[in-house]
Amino acid sequence: PLVLGIETSCDETGIGIVRGRTLLSNTIASSMDEHARFGGVVPEVAARAHLEALQPSIEAALAESGVTLADLDAVAVTSGPGLAGALMVGVGAAKALAVGLGTPLYAVNHLVGHIAADILDEGAEPLEYPTVALLVSGGHTSLLLVRDLTTDVELLGETVDDAAGEAFDKVARILGLPYPGGPQIDAAAASGDPAAIRFPRGLSRASDMDRHRYDFSFSGLKTAVARYVEQTPDASAPDVAASFRESVVDVLVTKALDACARYGVPRLLLGGGVIANRRLREVALERGAAAGVTVRIPPLSLCTDNGAMIAALASELIMSGRRPSTLSFGADSTLPVTEIQIAEAEAG
Ligand code: ATP
Ligand code: MG
Ligand code: FE
């Protein structure tokens, strides 16, 4: 099926067009520049930016893929989780488009969309199930067990406070580096010693393994960095950046590979904008290889928020015979990952 996907859960206005499992276009407009001076995504600003970016983005995506609206078999949209106001803009546009064109509409889960992005990775072998998936971005840090993309995604754990990307952004601010902080910390860390300072590993104690084995916590780490910088007048920014990054990466990879071992799954899929982190990719690949786990890292344009992954997920749902969503759905900022499609129409 030819599907156009709309993604507006955070600061990216993403329009993607796929045919079956083939990526035709992936247009991404970000309002990140407008948020930079606030040091974080401002929901109201993001929603307004989506409103302005949607129409030109749809036109650009159509032009790039050489299809017209009349060719579409379905429209897909992120219904949640994400920023409520931002989501509503995409949901409203998708409903209008689907009604106007008379095409089926599929409302889908953003997090599961991140996993579906892997399907569009041209060079890669088809994704096998089950797989463990680690999604790390500015808004989420989730460890998932995917038995089937369209029917069975289980949440193993998630962050109990800050998301990993958020931690990078906050620590960058402590070090006086501009927002978004992830790339800044990554660059600063390149010349630092990751073993210089032993920062805490959140929720990694033996006593955490009972209730929080696959959960993450980064706010204690951020506080530890702040305290260290306060108390160390001659602190080396590269060493702090490298040591902080090492703590985040260590916890992420350790927990993900622990889940692979425990569930007997020799596959780990990475997704989310923090996957841009060089050390994270390196450590995941190294330790994965040592543990006999194949680590899959889709290209970054498919890892950050985008519309193609939303179209890809809807395409999979259609190919597995799922009915479209009714128009009764809204934006659900806390949509659980187990709800892969929202408001599927009753049979008959
Ligand atoms: P969502 O959470 O809805 O997926 P988001 O916009 O918050 O969306 P992304 O756009 O996927 O998240 O990723 C942005 C985050 O990734 C920011 O927090 C940014 O600091 C972080 N990031 C980007 N590059 C790097 C890097 N090299 N190392 C660490 N973090 C990075
Ligand atoms: Mg973003
Ligand atoms: Fe996302």
Image (cartoon, helix red, strand yellow):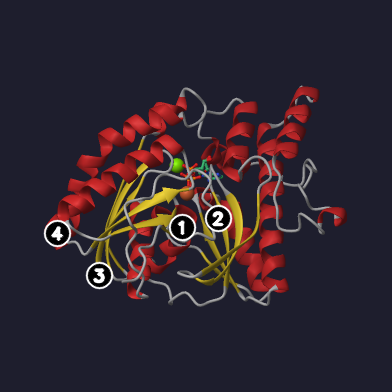
Marks 1 and 3: in contact by CB < 8 Å? no
Binning the other alpha carbons within 10 Å of mark 2 as few (below 14), some (14 to 19) or many (20 upward) gives many
**What residue do we see at 49% from left, 70% from top?**
151
Mark 1 = which residue? 114
Kindly identify which numbered label has been placed on residue 66: 4
Mark 2 = which residue? 135
Kindly identify which numbered label has been placed on residue 55: none
In this view of the protein, which residue sits in the foreground, 299 or 262?
A: 262
SS type, badge 3:
loop
Q: Separation of disc 4 and disc 3 at Cα?
A: 15 Å
Q: Separation of disc 4 and disc 2 at Cα?
A: 32 Å
In the image, the residue with mark 2 has its CB under 8 Å from the nearest atom of ligand 3: yes
Q: Amino acid at mark 3?
A: Pro
SS type, badge 4:
loop
List x then y, in percent, for residue 174.
Answer: 65, 27
Sequence order check, earlier mark of 2 and 3: 3
